[in-house]
Image (cartoon, grey):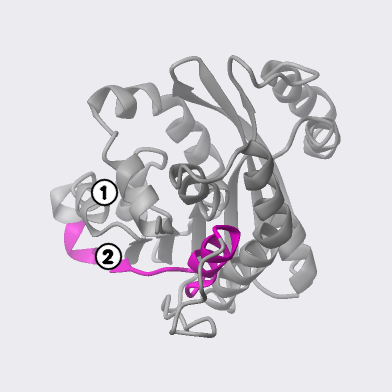
């Protein structure tokens, strides 16, 4: 049976130097936001760190007292840690963890008609305690990749599974991230919309960015929400469910490659009301 870990390991294996160079504008955009929210001496966690291609890990590590990289893929975590300047690596730790506590794999089993795992209920997940937790474009990766990799579900069946289970899995993951920063903030980075051949949107990505520049992020969000959104992976809804106040919203382009571009929606939320 496909698992969340297996699907993400397979995708991380596609990383290369060209991808890292191509994603440099996204890292710069992320830093323009994070520089305001990662104070010197902060304890920082990056969840869904992968290969370290999408975030300016070197800059974050230089500013942080401690940086913890969290992912399902230990090989990717080792590669991400190597992106940090050698002199700062002693302050960087890695942790392999499933932030869904097994709920994502349980949802995949259910969608495939498999028997529930003997492990039963969702497991406790130790993510440590931090001042800033950054969720790195992970929400669309909690279910979809493994469902798609199964080869047993068509597009409609995948959509049904995401609609049935996706937001519940996301809600649980977001709650764990907020619990890991009880007196701090959580920065949710979410690939909210995508553009590629066969995936049309009623507006251009540049339209959203221009709207954010001219009319503010709230207006840009209203426009973006009129697009074709991914199912069952909304961290803003999950944060609202916790009563966590949103303090800032920002948008940028993620030039994924191969004719694919994503709109990243960054949501900065206090971990608790």
Write the residue at 75% across / 73% down: 242
Q: Was residue 265 drawn as part of the magenta stretch in this picture? A: no
Write the residue at 70% across / 24% down: 209
Does residue 155 appear left or right of residue 26 in this picture? right
Residue 57 placement (x, y as % from top left): 34, 47
Residue 205 placement (x, y as % from top left): 68, 20
Is residue 237 in sight in this rendering? yes
Residue 53 placement (x, y as % from top left): 35, 38
Q: How many C-alpha atoms fall within 10 Å of the one at disc 1: few (<14), some, or many (≥20)?
A: many
Q: In this view, does 169 lie above or below 18?
A: below
Q: Was residue 93 drawn as part of the magenta stretch in this picture? A: yes
Q: Mark 1 points at which residue?
A: 80
Q: Which of 145 and 173 is in front in this view?
A: 145
Q: Do the residues labelled 2 and 1 touch (CB within 8 Å)?
A: yes
User: How many marks are shown on the rendered structure?
Assistant: 2
Magenta extent: 89-112
Q: Looking at the rendered structure, which numbered label has been put on residue 242?
A: none
Q: Looking at the rendered structure, which numbered label has been put on residue 94?
A: 2
Q: Is residue 260 above or below residue 90?
A: above
Q: Nearer the viewer, residue 93 or 248?
A: 93
The Cα–Cα distance between marks 2 and 1, rounded to whole angstroms, is 9 Å
Earlier residue among tags 2 and 1: 1
Q: How many C-alpha atoms fall within 10 Å of the one at disc 2: few (<14), some, or many (≥20)?
A: some
For numbered disc 1, what is the local secondary structure?
helix
Does residue 150 appear left or right of residue 90 in this picture? right
Residue 45 placement (x, y as % from top left): 42, 63
Write the residue at 48% across / 73% down: 102
The quadrant of the rendering that contains the C terminus is: bottom right
Q: Nearer the viewer, residue 70 or 231?
A: 231
For numbered disc 2, what is the local secondary structure?
strand
The quadrant of the rendering that contains the N terminus is: bottom left
Does residue 154 appear left or right of residue 257 in this picture? right
């Amino acid at each position: 049976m496909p698992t969340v870990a297996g699907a993400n390991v397979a995708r991380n294996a596609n990383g290369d130097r060209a991808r890292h160079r191509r994603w440099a504008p996204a890292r710069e955009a992320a830093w323009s936001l994070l520089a305001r929210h990662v104070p010197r001496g902060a304890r920082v966690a990056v969840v869904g760190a992968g290969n370290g291609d999408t975030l300016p890990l070197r800059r974050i590590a230089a500013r942080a007292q401690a940086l913890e990289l969290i992912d399902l893929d230990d090989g990717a975590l080792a590669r991400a840690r190597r992106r940090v300047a050698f002199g700062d690596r002693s302050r960087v730790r890695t942790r392999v963890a499933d932030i869904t506590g097994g709920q994502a794999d349980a949802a995949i089993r259910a969608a495939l008609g498999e028997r529930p795992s003997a492990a039963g209920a969702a497991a406790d997940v130790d993510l440590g305690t931090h001042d800033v937790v950054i969720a790195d474009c992970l929400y669309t990766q909690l279910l979809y990749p493994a469902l798609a990799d199964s080869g047993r579900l068509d597009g409609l069946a995948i959509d049904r599974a995401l609609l049935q289970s996706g937001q519940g899995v996301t809600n649980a993951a977001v709650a764990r991230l907020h619990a890991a920063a009880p007196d701090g903030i959580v920065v949710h980075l979410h690939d909210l919309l995508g553009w590629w051949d066969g995936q049309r949107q009623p507006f251009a990505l540049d339209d959203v960015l221009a709207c954010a520049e001219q009319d503010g992020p709230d207006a840009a969000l209203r426009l973006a929400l009129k697009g074709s959104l991914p199912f069952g992976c909304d961290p803003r809804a999950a944060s609202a469910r916790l009563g966590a106040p949103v303090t800032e919203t920002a948008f940028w382009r993620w030039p994924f490659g191969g004719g694919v571009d994503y709109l990243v929606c960054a949501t900065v939320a206090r971990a608790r009301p």
